[in-house]
Amino acid sequence: MTSDNFPVRPTRPTVREIVLIAFDREVSSEDAIAEAERRGLARPRYEDALYFGAAYPDVQRERPVVFLHQPWLGFFGRHDVICLWTNAGRRELGLVGFDDPRARDDRFAFVRRDPLMATGAG
C-alpha cells in the first residue's frame, strides 16, 4: 500500500461508526454489500480501515476484518480491498481480492450512514 495507489484525501482523521457484519457461510463481496444495504449501511472508504485499525487494534486479532471500499485495480488486473488480520500475534494490514469468495471467518466493515447525507442536507 502506497500513497500512489491509495492517495491521502482531505478528511478528518476520525473513526466513523463502523458496523461489522459476519456470515455463517462463505460469501461474495456482492452478497456482503447487498446485506449492508438492506441494513441501511454504506460502503467504507479505505481510510476507514486505517483509522479503525489504529483505534481498535484488538478487533483484528479476533477475526479478519474486510473493508469493501471501492476496489483498487491491483497487479495482474485483480480488484483489491483492505483487510486487517493477525498473523502469529502480529497485527497485519494488506490487500485481498474483491472478487474472491470470502471465508466464513471474515467480518465485513461498513459504516453507519450520516443522517445529513441520507437526507440530502449534507
Image (cartoon, rainbow, N blue to C red):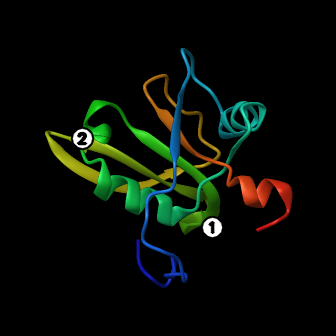
Name which residue lies at 60% across and 66% down.
Answer: 72
Nearer to us of marks 1 and 2 is 2
For disc 2, the neighbor class at 10 Å (few under 14, some 14 to 19, many from 20) is few
Disc 1 and disc 2: Cα gap in Å? 29 Å
Return the residue found at the far left: 89
Tell whether label 2 touches label 1 (CB within 8 Å): no
Q: x, y percentage for residue 10?
A: 54, 83
76 displayed left or right of 84: right
Q: x, y percentage for residue 34?
A: 76, 35
Q: x, y percentage for residue 90?
A: 16, 47
Q: Which residue is mark 1?
A: 73
For numbered disc 1, what is the local secondary structure? Answer: strand
Looking at the image, is mark 1 or mark 2 earlier in the sequence? 2
Label total for image: 2
99 displayed left or right of 67: right
Name which residue lies at 65% across and 45% down.
Answer: 99
Near-viewer residue (12 or 7): 12
Query: Would you identify the image quadrant in which residue 30 lies?
Result: top right
Name which residue lies at 44% across and 82% down.
Answer: 3
Asked if residue 45 is positioned above or below residue 90 in the image, the reply reads below
Q: Which residue is mark 2?
A: 58
- Tag 1: amino acid: Leu
Quadrant location, the N terminus: bottom left
